[in-house]
Amino acid sequence: MTTIELTKDNFEEQVASKGIAFVDFWASWCGPCRKFAPVFEEAAGRHDDIMFGKVDTEAQQELAQAFQITSIPTLMAIRDNVVLYSQPGAIPGTALEELIAKVREVDMAEVHQKLAEQQAGEEGARQPGQGPAA
């Protein structure tokens, strides 16, 4: 599979269309971004079941700001609409393959449970005077 150019108009649809998505935030003037591009493309060719997308931070400033991208390249791994990994810096192909394997291994039921517990805790903290649910 090739990489998909992601924009604010297609980002949500493309990322949600596959269970796992890897997103490369980049810019044409960025040397490390250009160095990482072939590594990202090669991984996309090996993993047809994963959506590999690229966000040009110059053309898609609103999208880059929404994800608080302050340094490029930034690689983001999303699974079931949950960001599992987001780090700036170009990584070698072997590290990318290891990251892909780790993302595949994540127990998403456990992740969703922890997120629900965290959200419930935050909601409880916003409502003073209420004790724990019985």
Image (cartoon, grey):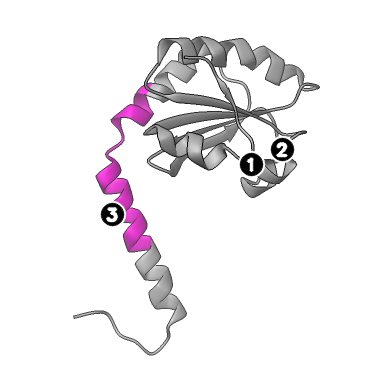
The residue lying toward the viewer, choosing from 88 and 109, is: 109
Question: Contact, CB < 8 Å: mark 3 with mark 2?
Answer: no
Farthest residue, direction bottom: 129
Image side of residue 100 versus residue 114, left or right: right
Q: Residues within 10 Å of mark 3 (few under 14, many from 20)?
A: few
Q: Is residue 11 above or below residue 2?
A: below
Question: Contact, CB < 8 Å: mark 1 with mark 2?
Answer: yes
Q: Which residue is mark 3?
A: 113
Magenta region: which residues? Answer: 101-118
Q: Could you tell me residue 15's position as x and y percent?
A: 48, 36
Amino acid type shown at disc 2 = Gln
Residue 82 in sight: yes
Q: Could you tell me residue 70's position as x and y percent?
A: 71, 40
Q: Is residue 68 above or below residue 92?
A: below
Secondary structure at badge 1 equals loop
**Earlier along the polypeptide chain: callout 3 or callout 2?**
2
Identify the residue shown where x is 25% and y is 46%: 109
